[in-house]
Image (spheres, coloured by chain):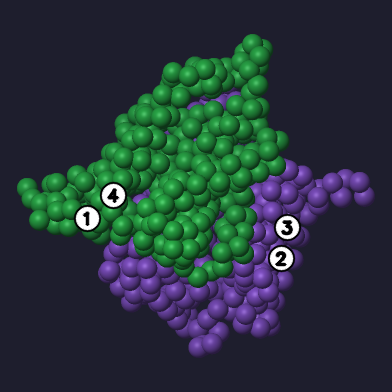
Chain colours: A green, B purple
């Protein structure tokens, strides 16, 4: 009984992290039909940029609370610069290709970016413990629990609600939904589809970098941290139904809770449990929980 | 006739390598054959219109099956290991295929990826199987005949060469006949195939089974070559490597996977030696270049040349 509370907290905190990284992935897929393997590298790039920026901030004896602003700044910078470069420089020439070919193209980008990161930041691990330690901890059923995790949950909530609000309540969001629904029709009524694609990709990349930037204080940032993230985010997004934001949230929550319960009661099965959830969901609902029905075309 | 000639010549060349080449070349050629056999299976799948990002699953099952024989049951016969690797992978593929054959496109790719990661998760956490370190295997006989110490790899290479060439010839027969035509028809328009009275599900299932079995054989070969297995064999980057080799070679010919695997291994050895920090970068650039300029793979260059000559 005593264990349930920490399990729930851990699960929700992990789910928040999962949601941050998979929301961008599902958004990009929903709009552009690209299952972006390079999402993991954008995540890693966010983590590295956060280490550099917040590290420089703290090294100059500036107020420690400002390091959180640096984490945000790092993810926005990564999203805007790397996102724009990728979309304008490469992906905009690839639209309309087979989805599996697009996976291969982004896989190639992932390989390239892994080494670019190594060339820029070197192969040694970077540490950024201050933002994690700063908010302290509180007592949860007798156990000290980091406040930072609560911040993470809050960040995911705000991000999710903001995305939902932009999509459903603003002009830009409605234009985006129109593009998802029928690309050619939207072009005909005067929506600049190419700009919508660019904006989507930049937002998606920013979300990936945000996930990375806020993970950086909790881990040692080393080459290869993006590798595992991709497969996890894929699992979450596929569980929810590709391209569905609500699906990603539910998928993240499901995976997060199952994982934290498994870690608590049967730690050997941690990785196994995540993919087992995915396999079970896909067996029951072949296109994920929230996927739209598609007509069969001859 | 040309086919028979090509297989005899390559078999002779490989046996020549196994007899006279230095150990490190023997090792590299074995890895090329192992990966080539796995990619041969991917080729069968890709001609059906499916890309599996989870062939590492069968590669890992094959490797561990071979290694477990030596480790737990003290059977150190290389021939038995190869058969066991392929058979174990076939059993797993026969089970998972029932489910996976119902999926297409990106869902097929991702679900196969998930299954390979399940195996990876199990292997990493199971202390009995050496968790992340894996364990060693020793093969000392080949179908009951004892091998002189120091010559094991040379014998395995010869055996691997026979396996690879037999697999390639069988695959060639398969894809150039009725079954192969049916597979490409499933790729092009599945619904029409079922209107014509054939079962796309069956085509996908059987081809998935073939791909899995070949990947298991490749895994057992690689385990014999390295003398060690670890969970990395089932990791998704291993599967990604296979897909890369398949794209590199293209799906035009059963020889393409082996040439592509050879190019890949040579480049990887050189890359690790001279440019360990930009090796993945060059890999990615190469992959982009092939997808953009040679969508049919390197094999299309050879074909174009022959036609113009």
Residue ID for mark 3: B4
Tell me the tag on residue A149: 4
Q: SS at mark 1?
A: strand
Q: Nearer the viewer, residue B183 or B133?
A: B133
Q: Look at the numbered discs 3 and 2 and tell me whether their residues touch, using CB distance below 8 Å.
A: no
* Figure quadrant of the N terminus of chain B: bottom right
Q: B134 above or below B58? A: below
Side of B164 relative to B267 (left or right): left
Residue ID for mark 1: A137
Q: SS at mark 2?
A: helix
Q: How many marks?
A: 4
The picture places residue B159, in percent across and down from the top left corner, at 56, 70
The picture places residue A133, in percent across and down from the top left corner, at 30, 60
Crowding at dot 3, Cα within 10 Å, few <14 / some 14-19 / many 20+, comes out as few
The chain identifier of the residue carrying mark 4 reads: A
Q: Are marks 4 and 2 on the same chain?
A: no
Crowding at dot 2, Cα within 10 Å, few <14 / some 14-19 / many 20+, comes out as some
């Amino acid at each position: 009984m005593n264990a349930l509370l920490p399990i729930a907290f851990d699960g929700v905190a992990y789910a928040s992290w999962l949601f941050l990284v998979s929301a961008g992935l599902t958004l990009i897929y929903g709009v552009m039909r690209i299952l972006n393997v390079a999402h993991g590298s954008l995540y890693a790039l966010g983590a590295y940029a956060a280490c550099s920026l917040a590290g420089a901030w703290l090294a100059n004896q500036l107020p420690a609370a400002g390091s959180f602003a640096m984490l945000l700044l790092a993810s926005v910078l990564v999203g805007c610069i790397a996102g724009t470069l990728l979309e304008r420089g490469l992906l905009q020439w690839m639209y309309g290709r087979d989805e599996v070919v697009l996976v291969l193209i982004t896989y190639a980008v992932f390989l390239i970016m892994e080494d670019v990161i190594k060339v820029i930041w070197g192969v040694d691990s970077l540490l950024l413990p201050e933002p994690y330690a700063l908010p302290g901890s509180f007592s949860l059923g007798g156990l000290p629990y980091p406040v930072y995790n609560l911040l993470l949950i809050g960040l995911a909530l705000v991000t999710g609600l903001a995305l939902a609000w932009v999509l459903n309540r603003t002009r830009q969001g409605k234009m985006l939904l129109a593009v998802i629904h029928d690309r050619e029709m939207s072009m005909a009524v005067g929506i600049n589809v190419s700009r919508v694609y660019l904006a989507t990709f930049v937002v998606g990349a920013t979300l990936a970098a945000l996930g990375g930037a806020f993970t950086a204080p909790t881990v040692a940032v080393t080459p290869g941290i993006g590798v595992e993230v991709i497969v996890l985010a894929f699992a979450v997004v596929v569980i929810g139904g590709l391209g569905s934001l609500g699906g990603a949230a539910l998928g993240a929550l499901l995976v997060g809770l199952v994982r934290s319960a498994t870690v608590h009661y049967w730690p050997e099965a941690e990785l196994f449990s995540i993919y087992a959830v995915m396999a079970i969901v896909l067996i029951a609902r072949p296109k994920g929980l929230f996927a739209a029905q598609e007509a069969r075309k001859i | 006739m040309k086919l028979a000639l090509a297989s005899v010549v390559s078999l002779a060349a490989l046996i020549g390598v196994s007899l006279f080449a230095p150990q490190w070349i023997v090792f590299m050629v074995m890895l090329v054959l192992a990966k080539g056999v796995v990619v041969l299976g991917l080729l069968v799948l890709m001609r059906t219109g499916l890309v599996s990002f989870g062939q590492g699953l069968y590669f890992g099952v094959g490797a561990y099956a071979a290694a477990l024989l030596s480790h737990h049951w003290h059977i150190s016969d290389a021939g038995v290991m190869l058969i066991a690797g392929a058979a174990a992978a076939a059993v797993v593929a026969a089970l998972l295929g029932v489910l996976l054959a119902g999926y297409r496109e990106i869902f097929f790719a991702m679900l196969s990826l998930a299954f390979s990661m399940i195996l990876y998760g199990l292997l990493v956490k199971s202390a009995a199987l050496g968790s992340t370190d894996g364990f060693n295997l020793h093969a000392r006989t080949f179908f009951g005949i004892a091998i002189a110490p120091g010559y094991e790899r040379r014998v395995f290479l010869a055996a691997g060469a026979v396996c690879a060439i037999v697999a390639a010839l069988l695959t060639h027969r398969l894809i150039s006949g009725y079954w192969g035509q049916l597979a490409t028809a499933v790729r092009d328009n599945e619904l029409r195939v079922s209107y014509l009275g054939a079962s796309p599900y069956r085509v996908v299932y059987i081809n998935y089974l073939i791909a899995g079995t070949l990947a298991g054989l490749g895994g057992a070969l690689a385990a014999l070559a390295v003398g060690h297995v670890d969970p990395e064999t089932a990791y998704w980057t291993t599967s990604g490597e296979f897909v890369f080799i398949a794209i590199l070679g293209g799906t035009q010919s059963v020889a393409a996977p082996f040439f592509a695997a050879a190019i890949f291994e040579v480049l990887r050895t050189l890359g690790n030696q001279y440019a360990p920090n930009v090796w993945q970068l060059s890999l990615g650039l190469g992959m982009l270049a092939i997808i953009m300029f040679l969508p049919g793979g390197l094999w299309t260059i050879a074909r174009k040349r022959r036609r113009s000559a």
